[in-house]
Image: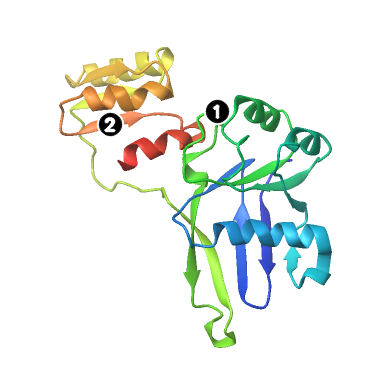
Amino acid sequence: MTGSYEIMVANAKIRYEFTIRRNITIIKGDSATGKTTLVEMIREYYESGENSGIRLKCEKECRVLAGRDWRMLLEAVHESIIFIDEDNAFLPSKEFAEAARSSDNYYVIVTREGLPNLPYSVEEIYGIRESGKYASLKQTYNELFHIYGREDYAGLVKPEYVIVEDSNSGYEFFSEVMGKRDIEVSSARGKSNIFLEASRCTADCVLIIADGAAFGSEMDLYDL
């Protein structure tokens, strides 16, 4: 599967509308924000259709993956959008990560913890918030919002220290550029080492250069 897909799921009391753009989308947030409710509505609609009292619109089939038979179920699902709640023990396993990467499905995963085995983008981590769009109809409207948004800097960024994720061409390039400005550059030698490298640094302004498309699982460390 490629491209983006719009999803609308609703019942008489609550409505969700959102767009997923990559093969892995993460939904985070505290309890009682509607994350598990979304997954349960997807499950109910898949099992009972319109008899569930739920409406779902999406050009791809949406369903839920859960339980200890998850691998057998996943092998039978193709070109679908799969929702997974955080209470599934298989979710952080390497076995699931390998199966997900080799499949042709999209995944929407509810979790409060990082999943280091999965390469998901910083830009595809969302929370759920309530909107007043349908207040007059006495229906709660929920929407997804970026937790880590893009930010454009109008002025110059003047770091005192630079940490680069890789140790090859990226490190060589920034060492050359920053060396002309007497700015020290170090290589973390992998995304999992960036936080440790940053925590050791005593500079006030540190620039970290990493591949955002696979850095999503590391972002929890920077919320501390």
**Considering the numbered disc 1 on the image, is that residue within a helix, a strand or a loop?**
loop
Residue in front for this viewpoint, 161 or 129: 129
195 vs 106, left or right, is left
Name the quadrant containing residue 100: top right
**Circles 2, 1 touching at the beta carbon (< 8 Å):** no
Work out how far the residue at label 2 is from the one at label 1, CA to CA, in angstroms: 25 Å
Residue found 81% across the figure and 41% down from its top: 77
Q: Is residue 46 above or below residue 160?
A: below
Badge nearest the viewer, 2 or 1: 1
Q: Is residue 146 above or below residue 206?
A: below
Q: Which residue is mark 2?
A: 207
Instruction: Report crowding for label 1: few under 14, some 14 to 19, many 20 or more residues within 10 A (C-alpha).
Output: some
**Residue type, mark 1 in image:** Asn
N-term mark: 2 or 1: 1
**Considering the numbered disc 2 on the image, is that residue within a helix, a strand or a loop?**
strand
Q: Which mark is residue 69?
A: none
Q: Position of residue 62 (x, y in %)?
A: 74, 53
Residue found 22% across the figure and 22% down from its top: 200
Instruction: Report crowding for label 2: few under 14, some 14 to 19, many 20 or more residues within 10 A (C-alpha).
Output: some
Q: Position of residue 65 (x, y in %)?
A: 71, 44
Q: Position of residue 191 (x, y in %)?
A: 42, 24
Tally of numbered tags: 2
48 vs 133, left or right, is right
Q: Is residue 68 above or below residue 62?
A: above
Q: Which residue is mark 1?
A: 117
Residue found 78% across the figure and 69% down from its top: 52
Q: Quadrant of the N terminus?
A: top right
**Residue type, mark 2 in image:** Leu
Q: Position of residue 12 (x, y in %)?
A: 67, 78
Residue found 82% across the figure and 65% down from its top: 49
Name the quadrant containing residue 15: bottom right
